[in-house]
Image (cartoon, helix red, strand yellow):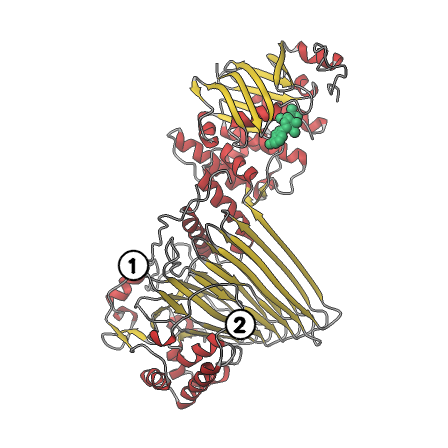
């Protein structure tokens, strides 16, 4: 680069504020009593408590994984509070009764809890989750008219226990991995969506996660079930206050697509990334998996990861139904001392299943980005195909990128293609833009946005704009 | 004088590429620089535009202001434009978006309001017609997958949109077939005017049949060795660039 990539001096993380909410926090530490307490607070059925306890007992025996290409000091799991809930003034009969301070917090985040169409004409239903609980879900009635269930996980446990019991843990079991087991033991809330047979969900569904309380972890769980021939597009956004101490976010997302169903799941992750010296920030250790259970079903993940001190996740798809399709589009940006080890897992079981993985990583300052992917073609997956493309862009001499593609093929008819590239922002490209009167910083952002375009264009319009804006904000301090 | 170059030298490492260039370009004129491959023509263009990889000494005044201390973008704001010999590809950056960003950035410096997408499109379409640019190229990424000719046309489109005071065209004719050359020349001629100076860099005299220059300069080995009227180009065509340089026996280039 013509100009050194400077230190990330005063990057603006505009979501770094805290809100003074009256919060009900369980004392730090984890044991079976804490789990009983959480389950009791949520008035859960016995089977769910048992499921949690089983997960906990597995978890205590599991070693914490160390194979990932990220570095952090050991987490003291007894120093985290596992439940924090803004105290409701009373139980909510309608959205108008949402605590004004909670509403103001969401307004400040740019998330409207009012049930109105957005400027773009797109209607988005929002489930707002603060710390451990869902505080509001919009458009519930309107969605119910077509049979779509969209509510907090806790509500689903109360109102739709059969569905929850049938599908909870069916894609990510309560002992899947260390963090998934921890989540199963202590998860507090999240979103639940059920799209009935043949229904094209009439609006975008979204969950907005906000960590507010200090010294807590956030362990949410999302479950989406798309019945035969249905369609849903689901968006997820996240932010957290600036704090010197790291906070753990260990979520689980399970998606189930039955025959011919389509689930599109988009994430714009902007948890607090830590400061220029690498202090603070969220540890984002998440398990996300979809099951294409039915023939010709499709699950598509898009993620834009600009936040978090450490991002560690591999949204994947199990392609069980014949002819089912799995897609993964990812942009992961690491600046300052951020680290990301992310990618996808595509497990082909059914015939003629197809998957594609498009991963773009951008590393600036001391940022370290790793793509790690697994493509597994089982002996039943006749005619399966995968296409993987991983592109890394490096900005600054202390940044790094690595690629670990794992491919296991057990059927000779499989076609697996893998392409990878690593590049620096071209001196030629920058000079060309600058010669046309586009200043260096703007030119850099333009080139990076161009590099990510293939992924951004899979996002719904509003989110694509937001993703580009986030990328610009994250890069601003690291140029020139 | 829009441009006054005095004893301009440029080095990469120990290699001196420009070895004392002197040149004056009056406002409103068209000048051509001819010379064999490797004589330093593109280096001159790049140095004037602010490319940072060269160690540069000497003095250049642009419209009376010191040019060499300015950043590339500042030079663009002052009104300097370079049509690149090898236009650069910007994957994922839409052509139209790129052009609008560039124009609005320049307009901002000139104290003008930004054009919105609709106004810009109307303006850009007129300019596209001028260079007979295929509309479908506008929705593609900048230069990505463009043919050689399409890239050159795109450079001229950018010139037409940014309306600079001084445009340097580096080998805009190479890679163009005769029809494309005519179209591009027509567009360039339409962009001539009393407030704009053009500097054409070429090693073929062919271009100068279509864009007739006020003056022709010859560059060899990093220096302007001859200057003359438009007939100089024809003379070079016949005798080769180095006819007047006795220590060289082999003329280089000169004929298409
Ligand atoms: N960045 C560079 N590094 C090393 N050599 C260069 C560089 N730029 C130009 N040169 C050399 O300088 C000479 C002049 O090149 P150039 O200006 O491109 O000539 P022309 O445009 O007249 O063909 C050539 O020998 C070329 O290899
Ligand atoms: Mg050249």
* Category of crowding for the residue at label 2, using alpha-carbon neighbours closer than 10 angstroms: few (below 14), some (14–19), many (at least 20): many
Residue at the disc numbered 1? A17
Kindly report the distance in space between the C-alpha atoms of the residues bearing marks 2 and 1.
32 Å
Q: On screen, B79 above or below A52?
A: above
Q: Nearer the viewer, mark 2 or mark 1?
A: 1
**Disc 2, disc 1: CB below 8 Å?**
no
Report x, y in % for residue A262: 55, 69
Q: Is residue B191 visible?
A: no
* Category of crowding for the residue at label 1, using alpha-carbon neighbours closer than 10 angstroms: few (below 14), some (14–19), many (at least 20): some
Q: On screen, B26 above or below A215?
A: above
Left or right: A220 with respect to B85? left
Report x, y in % for residue A448: 51, 48
Q: Quadrant of residue A53?
A: bottom left
Letter of the chain that mark 1 sits on in the rendering: A
Left or right: A371 with respect to A8? right
Letter of the chain that mark 2 sits on in the rendering: A
Q: Secondary structure at mark 1?
A: loop
Left or right: A384 with respect to A66? right
Nearer to the camera, A364 or A439: A364
Residue at the disc numbered 2? A289
- Residue at image x 57%, y 43%? B139
Residue A152 is marked as none
Q: Quadrant of residue A30?
A: bottom left
Q: Is residue B18 visible?
A: yes
Quadrant of the image where one finds ligand 1: top right
The residue at label 2 has a CB less than 8 Å from ligand 1:
no
Report x, y in % for residue A343: 55, 63
């Amino acid at each position: 680069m013509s100009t050194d990539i400077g230190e990330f001096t005063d990057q603006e993380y505009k979501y770094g504020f805290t809100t003074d909410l009256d919060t009900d926090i369980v004392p730090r530490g984890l044991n079976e009593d804490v789990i009983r307490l959480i389950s009791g607070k949520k008035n859960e059925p016995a089977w769910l408590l048992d499921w949690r306890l089983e997960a906990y007992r597995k978890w205590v025996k599991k070693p914490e994984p160390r194979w990932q290409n990220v570095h952090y000091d050991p987490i003291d799991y007894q120093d985290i509070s596992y439940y924090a809930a803004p105290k409701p003034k009373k139980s909510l009969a309608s959205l108008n009764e949402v605590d004004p301070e909670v509403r103001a917090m969401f307004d400040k985040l740019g998330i409207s809890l009012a049930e109105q169409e957005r400027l773009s004409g797109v209607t988005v239903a929002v489930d707002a989750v603060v710390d451990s609980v869902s505080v509001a879900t919009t458009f519930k009635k309107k969605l119910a008219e077509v049979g779509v269930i969209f509510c907090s996980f806790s509500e689903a446990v109360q109102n739709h226990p059969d569905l929850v019991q049938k599908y909870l843990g069916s894609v990510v079991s309560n002992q899947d991995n260390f963090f998934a087991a921890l989540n199963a033991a202590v998860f507090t809330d999240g979103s639940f969506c059920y799209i009935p047979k043949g229904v094209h969900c009439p609006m975008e569904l979204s969950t907005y996660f906000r960590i507010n309380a200090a010294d807590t972890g956030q362990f949410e769980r999302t479950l989406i079930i798309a019945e035969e021939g249905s369609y849903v597009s689901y968006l997820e956004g996240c932010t957290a206050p600036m704090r010197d101490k790291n906070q753990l976010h260990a979520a689980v997302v399970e998606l189930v697509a039955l025959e011919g169903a389509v689930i599109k799941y988009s994430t714009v992750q902007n948890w607090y990334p830590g400061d220029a010296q690498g202090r603070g920030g969220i540890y984002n250790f998440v398990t996300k998996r979809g099951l294409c259970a039915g023939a010709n079903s499709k699950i598509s993940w898009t993620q834009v990861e600009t936040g978090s001190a450490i991002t560690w996740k591999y949204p994947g798809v199990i392609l069980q139904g014949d002819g089912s399709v799995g897609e993964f589009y990812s942009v992961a940006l690491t600046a300052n001392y951020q680290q990301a080890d992310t990618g996808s897992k595509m497990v082909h079981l059914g015939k003629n299943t197809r998957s594609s993985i498009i991963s773009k990583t951008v590393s600036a300052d001391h940022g370290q980005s790793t793509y790690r992917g697994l493509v597994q073609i089982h002996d039943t997956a006749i005619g399966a195909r995968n296409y993987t493309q991983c592109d890394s862009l490096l900005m600054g001499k202390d940044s790094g990128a690595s690629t670990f593609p794992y491919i296991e093929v057990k059927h000779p008819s499989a076609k697996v293609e893998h392409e990878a590239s690593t590049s620096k922002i071209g001196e030629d490209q920058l000079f060309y833009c600058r010669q046309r009167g586009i200043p260096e910083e703007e030119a850099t952002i333009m080139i990076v946005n161009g590099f990510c375009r293939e992924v951004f264009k899979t996002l719904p319009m509003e989110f694509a704009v937001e993703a580009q804006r986030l990328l610009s904000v994250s890069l601003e301090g690291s140029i020139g | 004088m829009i441009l006054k170059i005095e004893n301009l030298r440029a080095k990469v490492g120990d290699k001196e590429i420009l070895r004392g260039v002197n040149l004056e370009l009056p406002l409103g004129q068209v000048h051509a620089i001819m010379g064999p491959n490797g004589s330093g023509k593109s280096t001159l263009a790049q140095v004037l535009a602010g490319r940072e990889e060269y160690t540069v000494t000497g003095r250049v005044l642009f419209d009376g202001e010191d040019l060499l201390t300015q950043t590339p973008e500042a030079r663009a704001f002052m009104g300097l434009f370079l049509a690149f010999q090898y236009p650069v590809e910007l994957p994922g950056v839409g052509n139209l978006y790129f052009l609008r960003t560039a124009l609005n950035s320049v307009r901002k410096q000139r104290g003008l309001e930004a054009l919105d997408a609709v106004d810009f499109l109307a303006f850009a379409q007129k300019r596209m017609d001028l260079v007979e640019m295929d509309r479908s190229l506008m929705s593609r990424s900048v230069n990505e997958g463009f043919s050689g000719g399409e890239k050159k046309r795109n450079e001229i489109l950018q010139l037409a949109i940014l309306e600079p005071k001084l445009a340097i065209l580096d080998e805009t004719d190479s890679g163009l077939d005769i029809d494309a050359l005519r179209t591009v020349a027509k567009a360039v001629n339409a962009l001539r005017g009393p407030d704009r100076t053009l500097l054409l860099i070429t090693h073929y005299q062919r271009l100068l049949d279509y864009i007739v220059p006020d003056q022709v300069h010859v560059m060899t080995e990093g220096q302007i060795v001859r200057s003359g009227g438009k007939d100089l180009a024809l003379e070079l065509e016949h005798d080769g660039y180095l006819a007047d340089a006795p220590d060289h026996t082999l003329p280089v280039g000169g004929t298409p």
